[in-house]
Amino acid sequence: MLHHITLHLARSKQFPEGSSRYGYEITAPLDDGGHLDQEEWADKRAYCRVRRFWADEGERNGVLVHRSGGAGGATWIIDYNQGRPGDEEAGYRLHQHRFAEGEYVTIEDDDGKPYTFQVVSVTRAEPGGAGAHR
C-alpha cells in the first residue's frame, strides 16, 4: 500500500534541535512492517514521488527509483531528472530501514554528503487520491 512519508532533518552538530525546514515528502509503498516494498513499487512506480524542501533553496521534485546492486543487492534513489545522470540522491540502506514515526534514515545529497532525517509522519496514500503526493 502506498504511504505518504515526511522526513525532517535530525539533530546534528549544525542543527542541535534538528530542522523542519529541511526534509522530504515521499510517496512510496510500504509493507506491513514499514519497509519499502520493491514488488509493489514495480506496479505503482508512477505514483512514487518525492518532494525535497531545503530552507531557502526552495523545493525539488523527483521520483523514487529502485536499482539493483549496492549494499544488500539493492539501492533506492531519488532521481530529479531521469534524462540527466548525476542529480540523484541515494538512500543509505533504505531497504533495511523501517519507515515509522520516530525512526531515522540517511540520504546522501547529489554531492554524496550524508544527512540523517527523522520520520515525522507516515500516512496511507492512494494513487491519485487526496493523500497522494502531488
Image (spheres, rainbow, N blue to C red):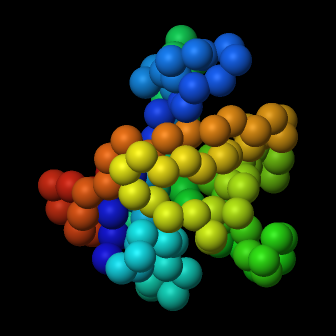
Rendered residue at 18%/62% (across/down)? 129
Residue 3: quarter of image: bottom left
- 119 left or right of 14? left
- Point 50% across, 64% down: residue: 98
Residue farthest to the left, as pictured: 130
Question: In the rendered view, would you say 69 is above or below 87?
Answer: below
Is residue 28 shown left or right of residue 42? left
Measured as percent of width and height from the top left, residue 80 is found at: 63, 47
- What residue is at 55 percent from the left and 31 percent from the top? 10
33 versus 14 height, above or below: below
Q: Is residue 10 above or below residue 134?
A: above
Residue 35, image x and y in percent?
Answer: 49, 72
Question: Could you say where residue 55 lies in the image, as x and y percent from the top left?
Answer: 52, 17
Spot occupied by residue 63 in the image (x, y as percentages of width and height): 54, 56
Question: Nearest the camera: 85 or 1?
Answer: 1
Q: Is residue 48 something that shows in the picture? A: no
Left or right? Give the position of 40 relative to 85.
left
